Amino acid sequence: MRRTSAILLGLGVVVFSLSPLSNSFGQGGDLICNFPTCAIPVGMMCYTLGSYPAVQAGYTNNSNFPLKPLIVFDVVHNSTGQTVSYSTATLDIGPGDTGFAYPVVFGLSAGNYTEMLFALTTIGTKVSPTTSLNCSL
């Protein structure tokens, strides 16, 4: 019984100590990034990578710590709003730097699509606002 209590207490300490990460990163109590504005979208555009349709998804690191790796999601909706595809790409951005990811879209027929882009850390924390982009394939 004591072992279980110690484990639960230990988990409580871990959860308590990580809870500030849900809103900001900081060292010594200094706020250095408010979510979801750690990665500011820049240079978003429809793109062709070789012969494949893609999106150029640029982000500027608005914090004073590296954002690496980020997973950039591109969720694709058709003209009726149905989700028809998604794609991901990874990106590493140093403090104050700008980087670009190129999620490629496969298997869609010609047409107009709305693509929703956002960036997450590898633990699932959203670090960018969602950006909408209209593309024709």
Image (spheres, rainbow, N blue to C red):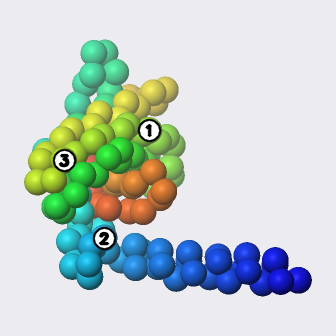
Res 87 label: 1
Q: Secondary structure at mark 1?
A: strand
| Left/right of residue 34 with respect to residue 8 in the rendered view | left
Residue farthest top in this picture: 51
Q: CA distance from mark 3 to mark 2?
A: 15 Å
Q: Earlier in the sequence, mark 2 or mark 1?
A: 2
Q: Quadrant of residue 81?
A: bottom left
Q: Secondary structure at mark 2?
A: strand
Which kind of residue does numbered mark 2 sit on?
A: Phe
Q: Earlier in the sequence, mark 3 or mark 2?
A: 2
Residue occupying image coordinates x 47% and y 74%: 18
Residue occupying image coordinates x 49% and y 26%: 107
User: Looking at the image, is mark 3 or mark 1 nearer the viewer?
Assistant: 3
| Left/right of residue 20 with respect to residue 47 in the rendered view | right
Question: Can you identify the residue that label 2 sits on?
Answer: 25
Res 9 label: none
Tally the numbered discs: 3
Which kind of residue does numbered mark 1 sit on?
A: Ser
On the image, the x and y values in percent for residue 131 come to 27, 57
Q: Secondary structure at mark 3?
A: loop
The image quadrant where one finds the N terminus is bottom right
Question: Can you identify the residue that label 3 sits on?
Answer: 94
Q: Residues within 10 Å of mark 1 (few under 14, many from 20)?
A: some
The answer to whether one can see residue 85 in this image is yes
Q: Is residue 60 above or below residue 64?
A: above
The answer to whether one can see residue 132 in this image is no
Q: CA distance from mark 2 to mark 1?
A: 27 Å
Which kind of residue does numbered mark 3 sit on?
A: Gly
Q: Is residue 62 above or below residue 44?
A: below
The image quadrant where one finds the C terminus is top left
Residue occupying image coordinates x 27% and y 22%: 49
Q: Earlier in the sequence, mark 3 or mark 1?
A: 1
